[in-house]
Structure formats: structure tokens, C-alpha cells
Image (cartoon, rainbow, N blue to C red):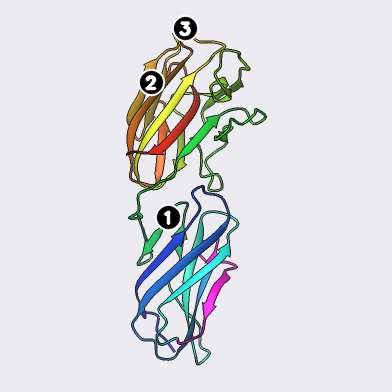
Amino acid sequence: MSKKGIWGAIVLTLLMPAISLASSQTLTISWNIADSSGISGYKMYYAYDDQMTNKTVACENYENPATTSSLTCSFDVDQYPFFVQIAAVPSDGSPEILSAPQQIIEFISTVQDFQVVPSTTESTASYAINFQPETSEIPSDYLPDTGNDFNTTDGYGWINNDIEAIRDRNSTLSPDQAYDTFIAVNPTAIWEISVPNGSYDVEVSVGDPAWPTPEELNSVHAEGVTIINQEGVDSSNPWITRTQTIQVKDSRLTLTFTGSDPYTKLCWIKITPAP
């Protein structure tokens, strides 16, 4: 039985947690099929590469295959990204008829015709990242960035890890731990976080309570929009905090530091959906 062209429009709806951590997934996949005769059932597979090596059955259904047009599967994943694939199972024992694999990354909510498209639902997720040494206390309501490269487990990190220093000042001047720590980055550094496409208020803070040096010029840009432009701090105001509304169109919010001289001391970032 050969029906490799049977798959018509395919829509996969993926319900995922707000933070990109390996965890339980619930997916509903629906389809139009050109010819369901001779089909005994359907399966959904998942794997961790686009060749579907060591693929695992997420779920399967053999009831009413002629009228079945969707599957809902719940399963645990160990990492991001992962890949999904559906299969029609012929009743005559011939090989399964497989769809093309589709990569699933953090925060994707809908896949149509096995092409990733943005969710039609506005993001309600907020993010707060503190830049700090690995051994330092993590401020309440923040996730720590300790200088690691971007990875799909955390969903954020450094694309170009051009870091000068990572410090915890333990200063009595700091209003809280988030202001007390920073990563000093050179002008060529790049940092990213996976977020749903949309408009965000991006707030960043830079500074150093122990060495508030006006001659050190801090610069931060998000998606090419300048938030802080070559500004120094001093003893009367050891931190600079600025906010800009930023549009994300590629599922990644990117920070760059062009204009830093010699580096920017990045304390924290907060990302919230814009009103």
C-alpha cells in the first residue's frame, strides 16, 4: 500500500509551560486525509532529531479510523527542541505512512501544515533575569544568568559570550540582591531569550555600587532599539534603569551592547507584555 501523498492540511496545537523547561507536553493534532481507506489507525511520534532517531510513540488510536481526524497526546520530553511526526497505519501490514517531522521549540503554540506560525493568542508571560555569579544568592522572582551560552533547556543565554567579569559586590548601597550583582560585557557580546512573538516592555538596569565610574559608558540595545546609550554612573546614582517597548518577530529577544566603553555592567532585565 503506497499513499505517501495522503496528508492534506495538518494542524497541531501545542500547550506548553510558560518557561522553557523539559516537562510534560499536551498536543492535539488534527488533519485532513486524502484517502483513509485501508487505514487501521494513527500514531504520533516524538524524537530529539529531525531523522526521528529512536522515536517514541506519544499516543495512538485504532478506533473508527475512517472518521478519526485528530489525536490528543500527553507525554514527557527531556529537552528542547523536539520533533513530532504522525503516521497512518495501514491495515494490510505494509509500512506506516509518515508525515514530515516538525521541530518544536519553546513557546510555540500552533503548527499549521507542519510550518511553525505564531500563536494568535497574545503572550501573558513575564520574565525577570538576574546577571550574577553562579554561587550568589538568587533574588526573589528572578531566574539567574551566570554567563552560560544560550541553550534550549534554560531558554536564554549568551550567543556571543564576550564577558569581562561577573561580580557580586555585597554592598550596603544596593537596594536588593538584583542590584548588587552584574555581568560586565564587552561591546560585541550578544544575549538572547526565547519569547513568543509580540510587543514587550523591556526594562534593564546597569551599574556597580562598588565602582560607580562615570567614564565607563554603558550601552544596551534590544532588537536594535537603544535602551541605554553610552551612559556612565556615579556615586550619587550607581545604577541606570531604562525601559523601552520592543517588538519581537522571530521568537527571540536579542540584547546587544554596541557602544559600551570599555564594557557594560548588566545587572538585570525584566520583560513584560506591553499593554
Q: Which residue matches tag 1?
A: 108
Q: Which residue is situated farthest in the top direction here?
A: 235
Asked if the magenta segment contains residue 192, the reply would be no
Please, what is the three-letter code of the amino acid marked with disc 3?
Answer: Ser
Q: Quadrant of residue 218?
A: top left
Spatial distance from mark 2 to mark 1, Cα to Cα?
Answer: 34 Å
| Mark 1 Cα shell of 10 Å, populated few (<14), some (14-19), many (≥20) | many
Q: Secondary structure at mark 3?
A: loop
Viewer-closest of 33 and 14: 14
Identity of the residue drawn at 39% across and 60% down = 110
Residue 183 left/right relative to 67: right
| Quarter of the picture holding the C terminus | top left
Please, what is the three-letter code of the amino acid marked with disc 1?
Answer: Ile
| Quarter of the picture holding the N terminus | bottom left
Q: Secondary structure at mark 2?
A: loop
Q: Which residue matches tag 3?
A: 236
Q: Which mark is residue 259?
A: 2
